[in-house]
Image (tube, grey):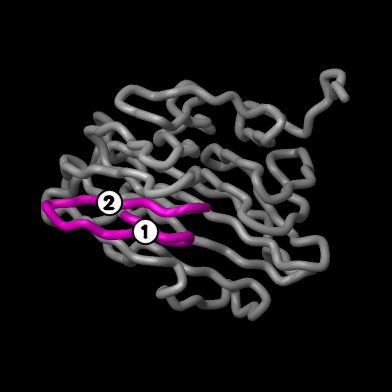
């Protein structure tokens, strides 16, 4: 049945909610046997790009000149970096620094989240090296001492990284302890369950498969609703001075 123009998707000046019924698929340069759903990028004012890729078996991503993060939602990837080949299964992920030659091929029908961002170097710090891991190998910690809200930091807590990617799991009824407003922007994909997200002055029901972008200083809050835990994958820019990249950048 036609939805007669109805959707939960919404775009405001400081946030975006994209629901799967509004996804538009298209290839990106260099891709073979796969298509992308571009969730956010500079066209909306974001300082990064995030998209989901749907692979056929044997599908391959194209190269990029910026740093790249991969997270496997479904299926499996073969990743070749510096002559070494690794297999990424579900919840497997990889960080590939700017300028790192690599090849990403799906070994079966797969779905993968891709995050890309130009690296902001620090004069006194070496850039990060590539890494491959699986979320299951990462220990979790509670947020704000709430054992019902668990966080896994997928990238090391080191100043060399200029962004962070975490997973967050909320038990039914768990919620953020405050409405957050901060300089970091976010890209967020709901992985499991659902709940209510406050974005700006709006309140949205969200479920697995939805994507959210939050601009800097967008008021934000989430509470899990339902009988199963809610989980999402979240990006934020991190570890850089707010004047970095501007003509007023402070001396390092």
**Label 2 neighbourhood size at 10 Å, few (<14), some (14-19), many (20+)?**
some
Picture coordinates of residue 6 (x, y %)? 83, 25
Alpha carbon of mark 2 to alpha carbon of mark 1: how far?
A: 7 Å
Q: Residue at x 28, y 37 (%)?
A: 118
Q: Residue at x 31, y 52 (%)?
A: 78
Identify the mark at residue 88; answer none if there is no mark: 1
Q: Secondary structure at mark 1?
A: strand
The quadrant of the image that shows the N terminus is top right
Picture coordinates of residue 83 (x, y %)? 12, 53
Horizontal side of 161 relative to 5 (left or right) equals: left
**Label 1 neighbourhood size at 10 Å, few (<14), some (14-19), many (20+)?**
many
Find out whether the residues at labels 2 and 1 contact each other: C-beta distance under 8 Å. yes
**Looking at the image, is mark 2 or mark 1 earlier in the sequence?**
2
Horizontal side of 141 relative to 127 (left or right) equals: right
Q: Which residue is mark 2?
A: 79
Identify the mark at residue 42; answer none if there is no mark: none
Q: Image height check: is 215 above or below 88? A: above
Picture coordinates of residue 193 (x, y %)? 72, 58
Q: Residue at x 21, y 50 (%)?
A: 80
Q: Which stretch did the figure color magenta? A: 74-94
| Residue situated in front as seen by the camera: 126 or 178 | 126
Q: Image height check: is 8 above or below 109? A: above
Q: Image height check: is 221 above or below 58? A: below
Task: Say if the magenta span includes residue 90.
Answer: yes
| Residue situated in front as seen by the camera: 243 or 45 | 45
């Amino acid at each position: 049945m036609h939805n007669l123009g109805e959707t939960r998707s919404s775009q405001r000046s400081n946030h975006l909610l994209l629901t799967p019924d509004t996804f538009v698929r298209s290839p990106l340069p260099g891709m073979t046997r796969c298509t992308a759903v571009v969730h956010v990028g500079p066209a909306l004012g974001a300082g990064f790009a995030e998209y989901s890729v749907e692979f056929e078996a044997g599908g391959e991503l194209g190269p990029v000149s910026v740093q790249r993060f991969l997270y496997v939602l479904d299926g499996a990837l073969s990743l070749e970096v510096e002559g070494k080949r690794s297999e990424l299964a579900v919840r497997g992920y990889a960080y590939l620094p700017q300028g790192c030659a690599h090849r990403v091929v799906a070994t079966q029908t797969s779905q993968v989240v891709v995050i890309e961002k130009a690296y902001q170097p620090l004069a006194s710090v070496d850039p990060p090296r590539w890494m491959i891991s699986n979320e299951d190998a990462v220990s979790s910690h509670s947020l704000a001492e709430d054992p019902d809200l668990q966080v896994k930091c997928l990238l090391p807590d080191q100043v060399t990284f200029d962004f962070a990617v975490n997973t967050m799991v909320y038990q039914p009824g768990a919620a953020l302890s405050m409405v957050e407003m901060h300089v970091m922007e976010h890209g967020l994909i709901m992985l499991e369950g659902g709940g209510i997200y406050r974005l700006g002055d709006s309140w949205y029901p969200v479920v697995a498969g939805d994507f959210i972008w939050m601009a800097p200083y967008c008021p934000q809050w989430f509470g899990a609703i339902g009988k199963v835990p809610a989980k999402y994958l979240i990006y934020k820019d991190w570890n850089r001075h707010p004047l970095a990249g501007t003509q007023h950048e402070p001396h390092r």
